[in-house]
Amino acid sequence: MLKLFKLLGNKRLFVILIGLVMFVALMGFTLGPRTNLSWPEKFLRDTVGFVQNIFYKPAGYVAGLFEDIGNMNDIHKENEQLKIALAQYTREKAQFNFMEAENKTLQEALHFTETQLEKYNYEFHIAQVVSVNTDPNNRSLVIDIGGRDGVKVDMSVTSVDGLVGVVSKVSNFTSTVKLITTMDVKDPNTNAIAATALNSQDKTFGIIESYDEKTGKLLMTGIKQEDPLKKGDTIVSSGSGGLYPRGMIIGTVDSVQVGEMGLLRTAIISPSASFVDWKQLFVVFTPEVPE
Amino acid sequence: MMMRRPVLILLLFILFILEGTVVPWLIPDAWQTRIVPNLVYIVILFVSIYNHRHTALVLGIVFGLLHDVVFYGQIMGTYSFAMGLSAYLMGFIFQTPRAPMPIMMTVIILGSLLLDSTLYGIYTLFQMGHTSYDWALVHHILPDVFVHFVFGLIIYVPLRSQLEKISKLNQKEKAA
């Protein structure tokens, strides 16, 4: 040890040690559940976000132009498929309106409280992506709406295809989105998604709590033996117990296996959001719960 | 001539902006989740070799912190620590104002390996990554090294001449 002191010089070693301790303290401090940012952080984030906003969109347009030229052939086919889907939607819409009206009258007849009525009345606010961090261990995005627009920590963010992540930090004009690819069982700060399958909401239930980085798939655990879940089913969030609102599309089932303990089963889910080429996202505003 | 230092900082800031906005669009879709270009860090490595390691340390810490604050997902301070430390260490080992091109390229390769390994280590320490080092190495650290190498080759000539001018300026100031 004394030799080390001599080699580095007392002063330098001292500075290095203090620096190390400071950094460990900083990391430990910021790792925990910290919801509010201090004003220098907010200021820095908003300023940088403003500049990034100027760059990101034009870059996206230029890249998109080249991609569009490449995709010209597929568009005709896609258009046909979309037309078929649209026809189906218009047919279903009539039925949906009937059911919604019926549902409302029934709710009124049963004297639902205001909170219960408003519970699933979500608002989707559009947000532009401002910049992307692709670090595999800490993937995050910056979007251009923030505290001024009513964004709060832990709101869900979806793309057109499906659930993308949750808002992790909010400053006045920008907010950071933590992607669901960072989801991890061992991390005390992440929240698992209570999930169910589309069209069998009352029979299927499972919990999505981790993302396998190697295969790029989500794992849904705790599925009961008698569950009718099968390959190709669409997985949506069930909205029971927590953070994620009801009906967010998460992905499709790749395979269902017997879980680690042997009693419950585990499903492997390929996420429907693509996690590349970000443009618009939607922040889901859930109705305020009166205290 | 006194304008060179602010120009360097401005360059680093612009690179930081490009890194988060334009660069992801240039990378093909399949590689977007694998390549994490850290262009700012490469320029800081140049500063570390041709100017001084202390300057590089400060720049690494400042721009690392900027990265941490803007992309604050779960933890802060990782980039700041990793960029500062590895730029300093690279300068500590290799610093020579007349370093020829092969040495600079070696520094870039070793430096980006060191940076990504430090980041990997920190994330593993705080239980945020659970992949094995072998896998991380093949999956994103080596592709990163390649991208950094190419970027280093591109900026080598213009950046070196600029940095040497800054160094000369410093020596003149000291002499005067």
Image (cartoon, rainbow, N blue to C red):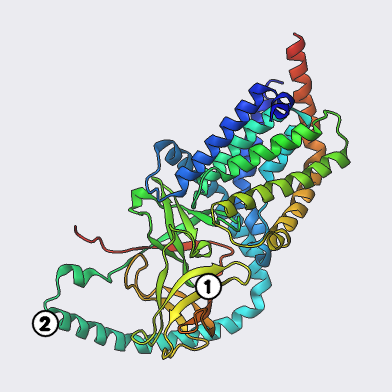
Q: Residue at x 14, y 75 (%)?
A: A112
* Residue visible at 34% across and 48% down in the picture: A148
- Outermost residue toward the top in this view: B176
Q: Which residue is mark 2?
A: A109
* Chain ID at mark 2: A
User: For the N terminus of chain B, which image quadrant?
Assistant: top right
Q: Nearer the viewer, residue A228 or A263?
A: A263
Looking at numbered disc 1 in the image, what kind of residue is underneath it? Leu
**How many other residues sit within 10 Å of disc 1, few (<14), some (14-19) or many (≥20)?**
many
The chain under label 1 reads: A
**Exactly how many numbered labels are in the figure?**
2
Residue located beneath label 1 in the image: A218
| Image depth: mark 1 or mark 2 in front | 1
- x then y, percent, for residue A206: 42, 78
Asked if residue A27 lies left or right of residue B100, the reply is left
Q: Nearer the viewer, residue B175 or A195?
A: A195
Please state if B4 lies on the left or on the right of A204 as rendered. Answer: right
Task: Look at the picture and state if B102 lies above or below B27.
Answer: above
Is B16 situated left or right of A116 in this image?
A: right
- Say if A156 sits above or below A218 in the image: above
Q: Position of residue B170 (x, y in %)?
A: 74, 19
Query: Residue farthest to the front?
Result: A2
Quadrant location, the C terminus of chain B: top right
Query: Gap in Å between the C-alphas at discs 1 and 2?
Result: 41 Å
Residues A100 and A234: in front is A234
Q: Does residue B44 appear anywhere in the picture?
A: no
Q: Residue at x 66, y 22 (%)?
A: A10
